[in-house]
DNA sequence: ATGCCAAACTGGCTTGAGCCAGTAGTGGCT
DNA sequence: AGCCACTACTGGCTCAAGCCAGTTTGGCAT
């Protein structure tokens, strides 16, 4: 249809040829592509050039490369497959992001939470804006949660609480809550959550996230910025959830107006 | 905190050093990084290696590279900035994805729609599943819409309609609808939309999308798969909206239960 | 039959060289 | 003052070669 004919760059030529072969299912999901040296030979280029072509496909998420084994066509198109055998976060219209433990149980997975980091820090600007605190001094307590389903890391949550609220309470230093919801702690402090706002976007993972969540190259993350609002209408807690975009999605049904 | 000390690979060393300089604001947003040749000289490596280091930062979205000018630190973290001076798609809890023309008008932008492609084709699997049609024969009419706000491409929409519905109607071949909503056409055919389902995920852009939407490297897209359901409960139309993730987001407020 | 090891693959990364293409400043010519 | 050509930068892409590090396999010794 609309493929640009004026391709001359060798690396693109190779990448395009391979991409077409993949789309035409000449190479099927799981198949091994020709090795870099083979490609270089058949296309009369240096191995570097063939290598770059594969790098392009890898960046597109079409191909997985394994050291010593080869480059393989990705098994599934980057698409949500809710209800697949892997744990999937879900965002629901009714409740927003489902609480992790409940959702894991619903999907028949074991749930575990680690707290790799907790302490007083300078908040990122977006968080400071929403909490109404300074972004140039340690005005919040930050708590990082790493969520595991069946011992696979699936979600990263970073909760920010203004220091003025957390100060003196167990929230400031407590390393683990175990099974308890963090909201019950707030209630002990006289903060009852009444509303929440959730902002959802997507971006590429930071290096630390790539490691913590074992994110393959070329896969973006979905970021949910959750703002808890108390009975006085004040934002008193912000949590940033980060999860692999290829295993998660938002799914909602709605009546149509207009 | 958790930076791996055992770095030995030259390209990573350079990338890490630059990344730290950027995080420490030695290089500030908008600043130009040293040229590839300079980096190669200061780190005693080949230019290719310095080049790869910059490529890594580019893939992370930390840096923009401009041919002939240099590599520049990205001005803003990839974050939604609704209400900024650029057009932003919005997904709303109440109505789902806002109709393009209405949202553009609300934001004071001119709206224009192009139809680069229309015709009968084989549907992708996800679309075929939702429409309940075959995915190995040309069972749908595909219509691509490219949406411009202030003459900048901001959104790509691909509508799929089963051939059995479109056959014989203007939908099958009509090249432009101009200002008219596509839904009014359905109503003429006796299909009244009563419900819609929207599935939202994120992924890296396909090459064609990178070109059509002028997506910078390292920026993912948000994909909204919209399924229209008629008065008989049948899915009769699927539209895939694709938009830059760094300019779009979903924003919703909700009461809290549990 | 078993186990081990070396050879022959695979990709990972770097070197140093070269040519092309886009950008911006400079200075001379009109 | 205005234009334009030149030049010295910038990144884009490729080549040919080499060494290292995982993976697989087949043959050899036990």
Image: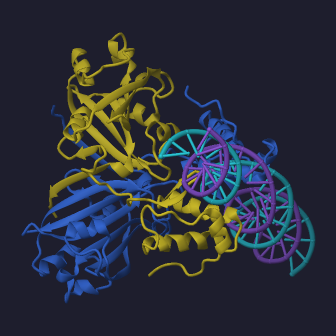
Chain colours: A yellow, B blue, C cyan, D purple
Residue drawn 70% across the image and 37% down it? B8
Q: Nearer the viewer, residue A96 or D14?
A: D14
What x and y, as percent, mark residue A100? 27, 35
View extreme (bottom): residue: B168
Using residue B180 as the reference point, say whether residue B213 is left or right of it: right
Q: Quadrant of residue B156?
A: bottom left
What x and y, as percent, mark residue B214? 50, 64
| Above or below A128: residue B178 | below
View extreme (left): residue: B232
Residue drawn 18% across the image and 66% down it? B228
Q: Nearer the viewer, residue A192 or A154?
A: A154
Can residue A155 be seen here? The reply is: no
- The C terminus of chain B, quarter of image: top left
Q: Nearer the viewer, residue A28 or A10?
A: A28
| Above or below B162: residue A184 | above
View extreme (top): residue: A168
| Above or below A95: residue D26 | below
Residue drawn 26% across the image and 56% down it? B199
Q: Nearer the viewer, residue B229 or B26?
A: B229
Using residue B49 as the reference point, say whether residue A204 is left or right of it: left
- The N terminus of chain B, quarter of image: top right
What x and y, as percent, mark residue D18? 80, 54
Using residue A155 as the reference point, say whether residue B75 is left or right of it: right
What x and y, as percent, mark residue A88? 29, 45
| Above or below B217: residue B33 | above
Residue drawn 32% across the image and 43% down it? A199
Can residue A172 be seen here? The reply is: yes
How many marks are shown on the rendered structure? 0
């Amino acid at each position: 249809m609309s493929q640009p004919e004026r391709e001359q760059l060798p690396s693109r030529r190779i990448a395009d040829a391979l991409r077409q072969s993949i789309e035409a299912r000449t190479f099927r999901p799981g198949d091994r592509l020709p090795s870099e040296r083979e490609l270089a030979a058949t296309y009369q280029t240096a191995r570097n050039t063939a290598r770059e072509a594969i790098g392009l496909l890898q960046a597109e998420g079409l191909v997985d490369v394994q050291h010593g084994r080869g480059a393989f066509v990705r098994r599934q198109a980057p698409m949500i497959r809710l209800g697949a055998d892997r744990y999937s976060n879900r965002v629901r219209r009714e409740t927003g992001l489902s609480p992790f433990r409940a959702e894991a149980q619903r999907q028949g997975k074991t749930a575990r939470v680690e707290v790799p980091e907790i302490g007083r820090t300078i908040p990122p600007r977006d968080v400071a804006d929403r909490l109404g605190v300074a972004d140039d001094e340690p005005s919040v307590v930050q708590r990082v949660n790493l969520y595991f389903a069946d011992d696979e890391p699936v979600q990263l949550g970073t909760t920010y609480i203004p220091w003025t609220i957390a100060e003196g309470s167990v929230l400031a230093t407590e390393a683990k809550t175990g099974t308890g919801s963090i909201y019950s702690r707030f209630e002990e402090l006289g903060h009852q959550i009444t509303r929440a706002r959730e902002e959802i976007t997507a971006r590429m993972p930071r290096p630390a996230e790539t490691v913590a969540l074992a994110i393959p190259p070329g896969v973006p993350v979905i970021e949910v910025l959750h703002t808890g609002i108390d009975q006085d209408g004040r934002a008193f807690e912000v949590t940033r959830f980060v999860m692999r975009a290829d295993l998660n999605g938002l799914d909602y049904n709605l009546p149509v107006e207009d």
